[in-house]
């Protein structure tokens, strides 16, 4: 009796890895110098809430960029499983934190295909908005952003092939704003108006949004 032989079945492609990148380095200048990561929300530091939102939205890998009072954040906040990235240049603005975060993701042993970037001071943006933006990933050239009433906002998703160019232009408080303006025709906008509110915690009056 002869036995037929068959080539091994090709293995299914691995799903893309879209990491959460939380920018949490701000010093809260307009909040009397209180670091935003340590503001209290639901009885815990705000940074914990922001990490939980990323995880519940589908980002298993989460890198958190710290700056102002980084040691205090490490001491007080429970952030198990996160990669904590120190940004000694945090006072230069959001651009430096974005550069530090993308560099950390690029250096990871496990290849990352995309970075979903969120800000620690936007507690009105929850896991459903994160999941919607993450679901719009299509390739390492992806460029996706949440939108609110037609206006681009956070979170934003950058495919890994775009990181070097984004980092090169990330200066001051602009972050990736200039890059997104130049490449606006390539952006996939995902409406999140029905599930999130994109307010920032910038001033004393904004603290009313926290619980």
Image (cartoon, rainbow, N blue to C red):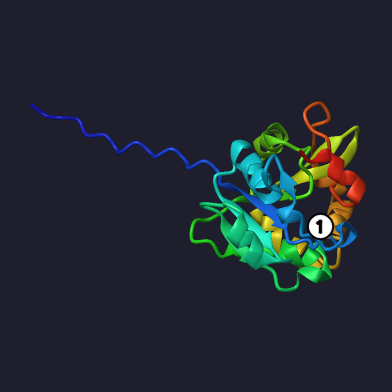
**Side (left or right) of 109 relative to 35:** left
**Side (left or right) of 109 relative to 56:** left
At x 87%, y 52%, the residue is 202
**In the foreground, 43 or 5:** 43
Decide if residue 20 is in sight here.
yes
Position of the N terminus by quadrant = top left
Numbered-mark total: 1
Determine the residue located farthest toward the front in the rendered image.
Answer: 43
At x 85%, y 46%, the residue is 200
Q: Quadrant of residue 70?
A: bottom right
The residue carrying mark 1 is 176
Determine the residue located farthest toward the bottom in the rendered image.
Answer: 88
**In the foreground, 70 or 83:** 70
Residue 26, image x and y in percent?
78, 61
**Side (left or right) of 69 relative to 34:** left
Decide if residue 158 is in sight here.
no
Position of the C terminus by quadrant = top right
Residue 87, image x and y in percent?
69, 69
At x 76%, y 59%, the residue is 35
Residue 84, image x and y in percent?
59, 61
**In the foreground, 48 or 150:** 48
Q: Quadrant of residue 82?
A: bottom right
**In the foreground, 185 or 210:** 210
Q: Secondary structure at mark 1?
A: loop
Neighbour class for label 1 at 10 Å: few (<14), some, many (≥20)?
A: many
Q: Quadrant of residue 174?
A: bottom right
Residue 16, image x and y in percent?
56, 44
At x 86%, y 35%, the residue is 148
């Amino acid at each position: 009796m002869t036995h037929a032989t068959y080539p091994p079945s090709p293995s299914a492609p691995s799903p893309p890895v879209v990491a959460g990148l939380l920018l949490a380095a701000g010093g809260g200048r307009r909040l009397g110098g209180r670091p935003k990561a340590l503001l209290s929300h639901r009885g815990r530091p705000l940074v914990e809430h922001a990490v939980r939102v990323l995880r519940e939205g589908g980002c298993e890998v989460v890198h958190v960029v710290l700056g102002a009072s980084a040691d205090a954040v490490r001491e007080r906040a429970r952030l198990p499983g996160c990669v904590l990235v120190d940004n000694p240049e945090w006072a230069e603005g959001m651009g430096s934190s974005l550069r530090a975060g993308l560099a950390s993701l690029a250096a990871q042993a496990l290849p990352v295909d995309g970075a979903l970037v969120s800000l620690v001071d936007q507690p009105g943006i929850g896991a459903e908005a994160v999941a919607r933006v993450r679901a719009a990933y299509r390739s390492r050239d992806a460029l996706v952003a949440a939108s609110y009433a037609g206006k681009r906002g956070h979170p934003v998703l950058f495919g890994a092939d775009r990181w070097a160019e984004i980092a090169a232009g990330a200066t001051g408080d602009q972050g990736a704003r200039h890059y997104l303006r130049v490449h606006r025709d390539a952006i996939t906008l995902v409406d999140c108006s029905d599930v999130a509110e994109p307010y920032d915690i910038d001033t004393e009056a904004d603290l009313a949004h926290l619980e």
